[in-house]
Amino acid sequence: MGAVRKVASYLGLGGAEQYDEAYGADDDYGDDDWMPASERAAKRWQPTGEPARIVMVRPQKYDDALTLGRHFREGHTVVMDVAGMSTTEATRMVDFAAGLAYGCEGRIERIADKVFLLTPANVEVSTA
């Protein structure tokens, strides 16, 4: 008698017969479905048939984070200039942008003083 049946019979639970198959015998998740997270993100946020788009965002207050997030989640590269914000709000905005980039498997880079580049997973930035 298997361990599951012993526990089920000890507890007085009937119907332990449903566990007759070995664990993993009916595995619907084969290795063919597996792909790295970066490839999944590239497929998810890749625009179909549209040219690449770079959006410039100059937030004035932290509430403008919604606009930044919407553009980035749509798969656009975003240049964010926080020079018009107070230091406290600019720090919060950069923290939000860093979390957004991390959560969507993208990247954030500082390209100038108070200017940041957010790139989706399918965009490669190179320096020449």
Image (cartoon, helix red, strand yellow):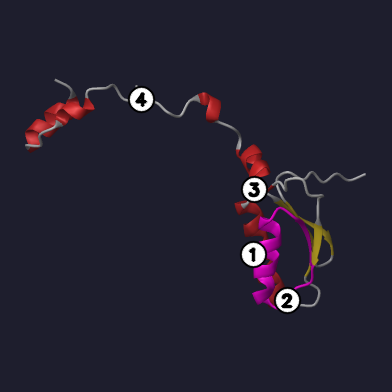
Q: As displayed, is residue 116 above or below residue 42?
A: below
**The residue under label 1 is which amino acid type?**
Phe
- Residue beneath disc 3: 105
* Picture residue at 6% right of the left edge, 37% below the top: 12
Locate residue 110: give its quadrant: bottom right
Disc 4 on helix, strand or loop?
loop
Label number found at residue 96: 1
Measured in 3D between alpha carbons, the distance from the residue under mark 4 to the one under mark 2, in whole angstroms, is 54 Å
**The residue under label 3 is which amino acid type?**
Glu
Do callouts 1 and 2 mark residues in contact (Cβ within 8 Å)? no
Locate residue 44: give its quadrant: top right
Give the foreground label among 4 and 2: 4
Measured in 3D between alpha carbons, the distance from the residue under mark 1 to the one under mark 4, in whole angstroms, is 41 Å
**Which range is magenta?**
57-80
- Alpha-carbon neighbours of circle 2 within 10 Å: few (<14), some, or many (≥20)? few
The answer to whether residue 23 is left or right of residue 46 is left
Disc 1 on helix, strand or loop?
helix
Disc 3 on helix, strand or loop?
loop
**The residue under label 4 is which amino acid type?**
Gly
Lower position in the chain sequence, tag 2 or tag 3: 2
Measured in 3D between alpha carbons, the distance from the residue under mark 2 to the one under mark 3, in whole angstroms, is 27 Å
